[in-house]
Amino acid sequence: MNRQKQSFDSCFEVFLADTPESKKIHYQLRYRVYCDEIGFEEKEQFPAQLEMDEWDSRAVHFLVRHKYTHQWLGGLRMVRHKGHVFPFQESSITHERIPSARYKNSVEISRLCITKEARRFAFRNSAIDAPEENRKISFLHDYRNINRNIMWGLYRAAALYSVRQGIKHWYMLSTPALAYCVKKQGFDIQQIGEAGSRESVRLPYYLSAKQVLDNSLWLEDYRHDFRLYSDITNDISVDVGGRQVKQIGVISFVSRI
C-alpha cells in the first residue's frame, strides 16, 4: 500500500514553556525518557519523577505536542552560561577556549527528549478528531523519521527564538551518530573537542543559530511559529465516556468539577 508522509505542521505544534507548569512538563518528559525509557539517569535521584538540575533556572524550554490528542511528546532547553561556563564544559575538553565576549550571545542546547508515544501516532486512528483527508494518510511510519521530525521542529523553534534574542552561537553535547544525522540534514555541525572521560560517548559540537534558520528544510514544512504555553486555554478538555475531563501534566487526566 502506498503511504505518504504527513507534514510536521499538520501534526504537531511547538510551545515556549513560559510558566512553571509548562517547565514541569519538560521535567516530566525528561524523567520518562532519561530514567524510564533509556536509563541514562538513576531514578533514585528524582523521587518526584521530575528530571531537573541546577541549570534549569538559567534555561529556556520548548515543548512539542500532538495537535489532536494534545499529548506532550518532546522538548529541549537552551541554557545560558553561568560565570562563563556552560554545562558541556564540565564534562568535555574543547580544542580552543570560547572567547569571553561570545558568552553573552551563546547558549547550550541540551535535554532533547522524545517519548515513545511519538511513534504511535497515525491519522488512521478514528478516535482522533482530524479532517477526513488527513486520517487517510498514515504519518511518519519510520520510527527514526518520527524522532527526527520532532527534533527538527524543536530546532526550528529554538533558532527562531535565538535570532530574535540576539543569540548567535549554539553549543551541545552529542553522540557522533546524532551529529552525523544533523549534518546529513544540511546543518553545519562542527566538533570542537573531545569527551572528558573514556566512559563518555558524547562529544562537544558547535552550530551557528543563523545557519540553522537558513536551512532549506524549512522551505516546505516547519513553517509555523512557536506559541507561548500561557496562550493555551486553561481548560483543555476532551470527552471520555460522556464526561468532560481536563488534561494535566504529560498524559494524566482529572475530572472537571
Image (cartoon, rainbow, N blue to C red):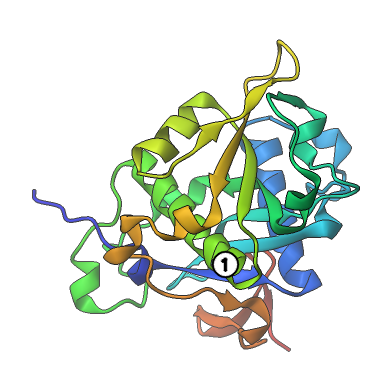
Q: Is residue 200 visible?
A: yes
Q: Quadrant of residue 105?
A: bottom right
> Looking at this view, is 77 or 213 the one in front?
213
Above or below, 66 relative to 111: below
Residue 170 is situated, as x and y percent measured from the top left of the image, at 62, 48
Q: Residue at x 72, y 62 (%)?
A: 60
Answer few, some or many: residues within 10 Å of disc 1's Cα (few below 14, many 20 plus, some between 14 and 19): some
Which residue position holds label 1?
163
Residue 71 x, y percent position in the rendering: 54, 65
Compared across the picture, whether 47 is left or right of 251 comes to right
Name the amino acid type tagged 1.
Val
Q: Is residue 5 above or below residue 180?
A: below
- Front-most of 215 and 179? 215
Res 202 quadrant in image: top right
Q: SS for tag 1?
A: helix
Position in image of residue 15 (x %, y %): 58, 71
197 and 20: which one is in front? Answer: 197
